Image (spheres, grey):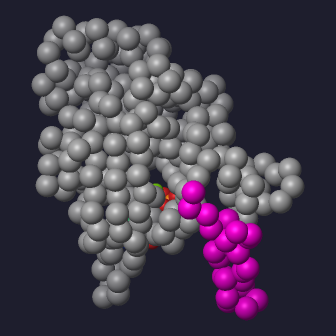
């Protein structure tokens, strides 16, 4: 479903080159639920923007749902759903249901299929009581459920989410998590989820891809991730150890010794 090979992206910032993503290779098979982790500024959102055709890679080869995202952005849009937790894809002043109607027109979904799909999504995401509310009046949790529904109205086989649970209370978060889990288990939708919430990862992801300084630092199961640190550790401990190991020690300004093994690509 996703094949990235030697993916790289640089930005020019005030005359100097920032390597946001470098030599990143990974694949995601159909039906997988993969978590994408990494410290702030690691290159996760840049990677997602390349996967969805928003940004062109500077180097490397990329295929998503059978397409080169940069060259076939429109064709790709019909095969993927995208949710950015930090921004809205809905129309701020319109009632949620009007936003959905615009999505229907954009994706050319016929009315009968749209009605059926919307009914299903309204039920599982509990949207019915705020369908007529303008998006700007929705709470964050309500809006996020609306965003997820909008990304899935055209029933894409691949869903890519960048921090969809950011700022949600425990109940809203559980609702979004349950929905994503069921979407993957029952409908077989492939999911790539970027998050800083390790509860999301523990509950949903079988596999984790960890990006650090734009590079792949780990690719394996949650169990393998935990096994990077000896003893009975939480996933937080293992991830913190990986993040810290790549930060310069303030006393020496050299990176701290990496954990054993320093990075694993399973
Ligand atoms: N449009 C841009 N122009 C210049 N630099 C950028 C741009 N977008 C991202 N960067 C830089 O690329 C690096 C990776 O950013 P990115 O947003 O991909 O990180 P991230 O892993 O999503 O971080 P976070 O967890 O904070 O969301 C950062 O150093 C960032 O400053
Ligand atoms: Mg980001």
Q: Is residue 132 above or below residue 90?
A: above
Q: Residue at x 30, y 88 (%)?
A: 15
Viewed as shown, does residue 189 lie left or right of 175?
left
Residue 130 picture location, percent across and down: 41, 16
Nearer to the camera, 15 or 137 = 15
Residue 265 picture location, percent across and down: 56, 61
Instruction: Tell me the quarter of the picture where residue 171 sits.
Output: top right
The quadrant of the rendered image in which ligand 1 is seen is: bottom left
Nearer to the camera, 251 or 63 = 63
Residue 154 seen in this snapshot: yes
Numbered marks: total = 0
Quadrant holding the N terminus: top left
Q: Residue at x 57, y 39 (%)?
A: 205
Viewed as shown, does residue 93 lie left or right of 247?
left
View extreme (right): residue: 231
Residue 222 picture location, percent across and down: 65, 46
Q: Is residue 117 above or below residue 152?
A: above
User: Per the image, is 264 magenta?
Assistant: yes
View extreme (front): residue: 266
Nearer to the camera, 198 or 208 = 208
Instruction: Tell me the quarter of the picture where residue 152 sits.
Output: top left
User: Per the image, is 69 magenta?
Assistant: no
Quadrant holding the C terminus: bottom right
Residue 126 picture location, percent across and down: 47, 14
Nearer to the camera, 39 or 64 = 64
Q: What secondary structure is the magenta-colored segment mainly? A: loop
Magenta-drawn segment: 242-266
Q: Residue at x 62, y 47 (%)?
A: 221
Residue 95 seen in this snapshot: no
Viewed as shown, does residue 258 lie left or right of 194?
right
């Amino acid at each position: 479903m996703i094949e990235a090979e030697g993916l790289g992206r640089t930005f020019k910032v005030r005359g100097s080159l920032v390597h946001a993503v470098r030599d990143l290779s990974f694949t995601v098979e159909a039906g997988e639920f993969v978590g994408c982790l990494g410290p702030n500024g690691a290159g996760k959102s840049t990677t997602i923007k390349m996967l969805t055709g928003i940004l062109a890679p500077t180097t490397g080869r990329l295929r998503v749902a059978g397409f080169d995202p940069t060259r076939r952005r429109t064709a790709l849009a019909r095969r993927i759903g995208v949710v950015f937790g930090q921004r809205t894809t809905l129309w701020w002043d319109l009632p949620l249901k009007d936003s959905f109607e615009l999505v229907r027109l954009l994706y050319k979904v016929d009315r009968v299929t749209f009605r059926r799909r919307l009914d299903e999504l309204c039920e599982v995401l509990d949207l019915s009581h705020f369908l007529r509310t303008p998006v700007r009046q929705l709470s964050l949790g309500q809006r996020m459920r609306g965003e997820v529904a909008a990304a899935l109205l055209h029933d894409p086989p691949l869903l890519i989410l960048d921090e969809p649970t950011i700022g949600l209370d425990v109940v809203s978060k559980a609702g979004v998590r349950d929905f994503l889990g069921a979407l993957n288990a029952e409908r077989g939708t492939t999911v790539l989820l970027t998050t800083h919430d390790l509860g999301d990862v523990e509950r949903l992801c079988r596999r984790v891809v960890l990006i650090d300084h734009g590079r792949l630092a780990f690719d394996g199961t949650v169990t393998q991730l935990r096994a990077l640190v000896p003893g009975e550790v939480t996933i937080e401990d293992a991830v913190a150890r990986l993040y810290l190991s790549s930060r310069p020690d303030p006393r020496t300004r050299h990176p701290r010794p990496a954990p054993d093994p320093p990075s694993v690509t399973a």
